[in-house]
Image: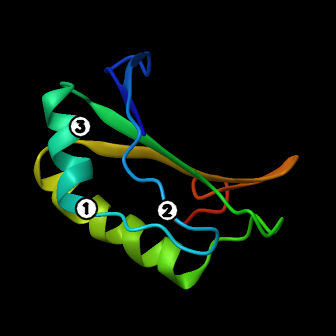
Amino acid sequence: MLSLDSRNVIIKENLISKGLTDKTPVYPRQVIETAMKNGAHSILLLHNHTNGNPQASEQDITITKAIDIPARLLNISIYDHIIIAGARYFSFRENKII
């Protein structure tokens, strides 16, 4: 996760979770607390798909929404959520999911 200031300049980079090849636990509370601790205006979420397919899964969409709702209440926005798979990527923003 990258915490961004109001000009979208990186404040801090944090590793939120490290998992197995097919799943990683992500806790929205931890993401929000980290963003608040960093004084973030917005956050950029990033993760990889080791299977080579960057398409967002239902779990990816669900967890992003679970982070977005409380973040908005605290005036923190999700700038984007990017999934990287090899040389390809998927952007929630470009695909109008957030």
State the image coordinates of residue 94 (x, y, percent, origin top left): 66, 53
Q: Mark 1 points at which residue?
A: 28
State the image coordinates of residue 18 (x, y, percent, origin top left): 47, 54
Q: Is mark 3 on a helix, strand or loop?
A: helix
Q: Is mark 1 on a helix, strand or loop?
A: helix
- Rendered view: 25 above or below 34: below
Q: State the separation of the CA atoms marked 2 and 1.
A: 16 Å
Q: How is the image coloured?
A: rainbow
Q: State the separation of the CA atoms marked 3 and 1.
A: 11 Å
Q: Mark 2 points at which residue?
A: 19
- Res 82 label: none
Q: Name the residue under label 3.
A: 35
Residue in view at x 14 percent, y 30 percent: 37
State the image coordinates of residue 20 (x, y, percent, origin top left): 56, 67
- Which residue in the rendered view is the most extreme toward the front? 20
Q: Is mark 2 on a helix, strand or loop?
A: loop
Foreground tag (2 vs 1): 2
- Sequence-wise, the earlier of marks 3 and 2 is 2
Q: In this view, does 95 lie to the left or right of 85?
A: left
Image-quadrant location for residue 76:
top left
Foreground tag (3 vs 2): 2
Q: Give the amino acid at mark 1.
A: Pro
Residue in view at x 38 percent, y 68 percent: 25
Q: Give the amino acid at mark 2.
A: Gly
Could you tell me if the residues under marks 3 and 2 are in contact, i.e. CB atoms within 8 Å? no
- Sequence-wise, the earlier of marks 2 and 1 is 2
Q: In this view, does 76 lie to the left or right of 62?
A: left
- Rendered view: 13 above or below 17: above
